[in-house]
Image: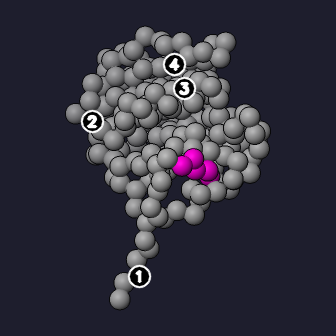
Amino acid sequence: MKNTVEEPILDYGKVYTYADYLQWRFKERIEILKGNVFKMSPAPARNHQSTSRELGRIFVNFFHKKDCKVYIAPFDVRLVDKRKNSTKDEDISTVFQPDLCVICDKNKLDEKGCIGAPDLIIEILSPSNSNREMKNKYELYEENGVREYWIVDYVYKTIHRYVLKDDIYIGLKPLIAEETATSFIFPDLSFTVGEIFED
């Protein structure tokens, strides 16, 4: 007889922590944003995965043998609650898996992933991304000092970039397939937007 693991029943009115997250066994991936649980889709769409693959190829090649490291989902990023200022699992109420992130401070890396804000985060839009989730992530990344944030839309083949200036995100010009995407904080990193999208 097959052994099955019962999925825990979540109380969506409760505030959860990274300690809770480590105990869970779900079929879907889970993220916790300020204690609120968000279920991610069990398997992202093919276009999402091909876009992630091509972004990964460009970023991994660019950062090869450089100090900054590239990580592609699934990869846990935990943010420290500034009020508690504690890195204990039970005090962390935000853990998420960006589609791609770049981390330059090696002290933020441990065997579980990253603790603290990556320098650059890329999120690829998909039907499973709720407006609330995207709003929460934007605010979280801004509040925690993610220096550059990209939102990639494979349906419209666009990239929206935000750069942190005086603790506030400034939106740069949206980019379409024919244009060149260049990172603000890594100015030597550039590519044609259309390269990352399959026809």
Gap between marks 1 and 4 measured at Cα: 46 Å
Gap between marks 3 and 2 measured at Cα: 30 Å
The mark nearer the N terminus, 2 or 1, is 1
Amino acid type, mark 4 = Tyr
Q: Residue at x 57, y 29 (%)?
A: 141
Screen quadrant of the N terminus: bottom left
The mark nearer the N terminus, 1 or 3, is 1
Residue matched to label 4: 162
Give x and y (percent) for residue 46.
28, 46
Q: Residue at x 47, y 64 (%)?
A: 8
Amino acid type, mark 2 = Glu
Relative to 36, is 133 above or below? above
Give x and y (percent) for residue 108.
72, 42
Looking at the rendered structure, which numbered label has been put on residue 139?
3
Residue matched to label 2: 198
Q: Residue at x 48, y 12 (%)?
A: 172
Q: Which residues are magenta?
A: 14-18
Residue matched to label 1: 3
Gap between marks 2 and 1 measured at Cα: 40 Å
| Side of 33 where 27 appears, left or right | left
The mark nearer the N terminus, 2 or 4, is 4
Query: Given contact means CB atoms under 8 Å apart, are the residues at marks 2 and 4 in contact?
Result: no
Gap between marks 1 and 3 measured at Cα: 41 Å
Which of the two marks, 4 or 3, is nearer to us in this view?
A: 3
| Residue 16 lies in the magenta-colored region | yes
* SS of the residue under disc 1: loop
